Image: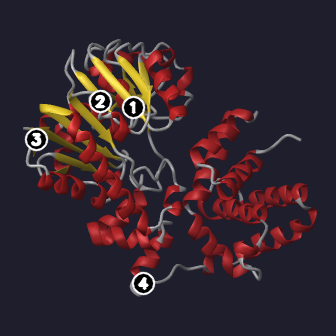
Amino acid sequence: MVQTARDIALDVLLAIEERGAYSNLALTTALRRSRLSARDVGLTTEIVYGTVGRLNTLDYYLTPALKTPLHKLEPWVRNLLRLTVYQLFYLERIPSFAAINEAVEIAKRRGRKASGFVNGVLRGTLRNKEALKLPAKEKNWTRHTALLHSHPEWMVQVWAEAFGREEAERLCEANNDRPALCLRVNSNRVTRDELLAELTEQGITAHPSSVSPYGIMLQEGLDVAQLPAFKEGRCTVQDESSMLVAQALDPKPGERILDCCAAPGGKTTHIAELMGDTGDVLAVDVHAHKIELIENVMNRLGLASISTRAGDIRDVVGEAGKFDRILLDAPCSGLGVIKRKPDLKWRKVPGDISEIAELQRELLNTVSQALRPGGVLVYSTCTVMPEENIDVVRAFLAEHPDFEADPIAPYLMEGVHGAIQDDCAVQLMPQQFGSDGFFIARLRRK
């Protein structure tokens, strides 16, 4: 049986819900195994990310049409209803009758007895569409915002307390945007202007990043792995916010660098490129199976200055000697990259933030001991939570008088200077530049 775009989307949603699969990985695997056209690949991707991202709102819209609670339905029925309601409410280009008819056909193939139920619920929801209203913003701002922008209520409340209601709402809204596709030029092999010109000749619309001097933003989705520049190691894929980490580290040729949590290797290889591939970059990751990811990237980019090691960085630093510069891209809640991994927001609970902040403080305390006097340590995360970011840095500096905040502005483009905190750190928010949410702090050992 040939699977349609919606069949595959349903399988991915079931993998996420039942097996705890990550949305981006499950979708990539499913699409590689499929024989979908480029158009249907786009539809599958839209349905998966849209359904996962709008989960609580879809359930809110579905509930009035159900006599049986949603959580008691068979998983495939529940997710088929969700992905179809996503089309009814958010994809105007798809006719409602077509979305419902396709859902009924899928139900017939998967469990004929359920097809009538699916048809009735969806048609009832469609008839009631105009009457379905969100809770009034004036009466319950948190619940209204959580349903309007599809986030857990606790997360909306935490952000409102940290950033104010207006910024919290902008952040939630930005998290529902589709992430841009960004290339980082391999500065050892090509300049950004040269690669931009090459892409233009190939009919690809692209423009320079306003966040990083090494970034190129692509205007349309494409299979980057098929680009000659990618195959030949003249570029790689990396979000523009993430590029600022290696820039803040400012590695010099011939230095000894430690990258503590290195997989999948984007920042590691950027460090090596900025050093002119001279010196020694030790890339460590606790997950042995991810070391191959780092090696694949460095080999494709033609970088020889990187060595890899699997292990807990807390065990490695004691025997690895001293380093000129250290990057700790710490484990974090990941709440700055929700637009890329929408299932993250449903996996997290409030206690996760405090728990991981404790680990971050421990890691920072440990790895700092391996930095030589005068050396630079960069601490970074892909989250927006102050508890994991500036609070960790302030606590570290208060407890370590042998370290000082080092100004970060000289290593950043002027356009992002407005996001600088405490002179030594920058907090990029998804709503500011359209990039990932990222925190980067630059510290120096006296």
- Label 1 crowd bin: few (<14), some (14–19), many (20+), radius 10 Å: many
- Label 4 crowd bin: few (<14), some (14–19), many (20+), radius 10 Å: few
Closer to viewer: mark 4 or mark 3? 3
Residue 216 appears in the picture as rendered = no
Helix, strand or loop status at disc 2: strand
User: What amino acid is at disc 1?
Assistant: Val
Asked if the residue at tag 1 contacts the one at tag 2, i.e. Cβ–Cβ closer than 8 Å, the answer is yes
- Label 2 crowd bin: few (<14), some (14–19), many (20+), radius 10 Å: many
Residue on which disc 4 sits:
140
Real-space Cα distance between discs 2 and 4?
Answer: 48 Å
Q: Earlier in the sequence, mark 4 or mark 3?
A: 4
Q: Earlier in the sequence, mark 2 or mark 1?
A: 2
User: What amino acid is at disc 3?
Assistant: Pro
Q: Is residue 398 rendered to the left or right of residue 112?
A: left
Q: Earlier in the sequence, mark 1 or mark 3?
A: 1
> Picture coordinates of residue 260 (x, y %)?
34, 36
> Picture coordinates of residue 197 (x, y %)?
38, 17
Real-space Cα distance between discs 1 and 3?
Answer: 27 Å
Closer to viewer: mark 1 or mark 4? 1
Quick one: 200 or 338, which is closer to the camera?
A: 338
Circle on res. 386: none
Quarter of the image where the N terminus is located? top right
